[in-house]
Amino acid sequence: MKKYNIAIVGVTGAVGQEFLRLIEERNFPFANLKMLASKRSAGKKINFMGKEYTVEETTEDSFKDVQIALFAGGSASKVFAKPAVDSGAIVIDNSSAFRMDPEVPLVVPEVNPQAIARHKGIIANPNCSTIIMVMALKPLYDIAKIKRIVVSTYQAVSGAGREGMQELEDQVNEIVNNKPVETKVLPVASLDKKYQIAFNLLPQIDVFQENLYTKEEMKMINETMKIMEDSDMKITATTVRVPVYRSHAESVNVEFDNEVSVESARAALEKFPGVKVCDNPDEMIYPQPLNTSGKDDVEVGRIRKDYSIEHGLNFWVCGDQIRKGAALNALQIAEYIINNA
């Protein structure tokens, strides 16, 4: 099998570290690997697959001879993605920089792999909560056209990166030890006002927009329509940060244009790659963040009719935000490119 020269931009962060774990787990065919990060991380040593690597500062010249560049997210994408493409690399980007660019495919490989062929050097990885939702929506959409979606998310602190996870741990320890609770990161690191996340819920993920939705909510709305290639689909979202380390959960209500039974929905979901039906109320079996953390599959359960509308279903979905919601999805895009070269 042909091997590829790859680079990981943001390798020291949570998603970058997950890239490394998945590359080893999935035997990704790489020949050479560049570990790139910001200036403050340059010089760090990382042991990977029996070899010691030195993290390099990302520059416009970092991508010579690189064929696939995996961007873990953040501001680096706006600065270095296009220079990477100019150097000959295919960029798979986990930031929001290019997601709504009409020239850039927004891809979940199980859902819209056909979009990959339209790339012009950059392929965007969707928002984590969008990926988890569309994995469950696509097999249902293949049964009947979806008219409307109402989604409420319960998003783990891993969505705020390593700092968010550390803040939850620190706050729990402070509360247990009767110490003052420090708030430094959540709900939004860039804003001055901060709130406690331990034993609390924060109905704000990212900044508020003029329409009173948060940026995260609008990402889910706009990205879902782009991925599903259906601008007529009506979507409303409420995104909430919860005191869970890892793995997002979502309550999804779907209205179809004709009848979809619980049985046909379950059958379609069971056949869909990357989805695991976890739904047995008699045995109290349903998806939980603890059970999906560290797992590749998105789990779907609590599948039931919505009796308040004519053709409606409710379901509950959980998925690991760092794996399928970020690093795994990006790596699957790279694997698709390799397998269809």
Image: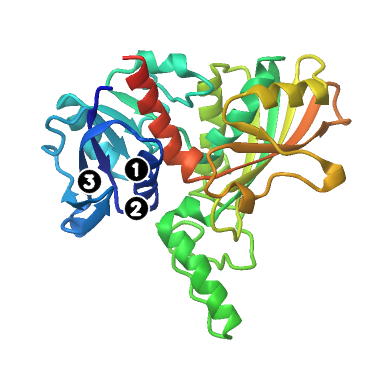
Residue 175 x, y percent position in the rendering: 59, 79
Q: Which residue is mark 3?
A: 35
Circles 1 and 2, Cβ within 8 Å, touching? The answer is yes
Res 337 → quadrant = top left
Image quadrant occupied by the C terminus: top left
What is the crowding at mark 2: few (fewer than 14 residues within 10 Å), some, or many (at least 20)?
some
Q: Which residue is mark 1?
A: 72
Badge 1 or badge 3: first in the primary sequence: 3
Residue at point 52%, 42% (across, down): 216
Residue 87 x, y percent position in the rendering: 14, 27
Secondary structure found at label 1: loop
The amino acid pointed to by label 2 is Gly
Does residue 126 lie above or below 318 as drawn?
Answer: above
Q: Is residue 103 left or right of residue 214?
A: left
Mark 3 or 2, closer to the camera: 3
Q: Which residue is mark 2?
A: 13
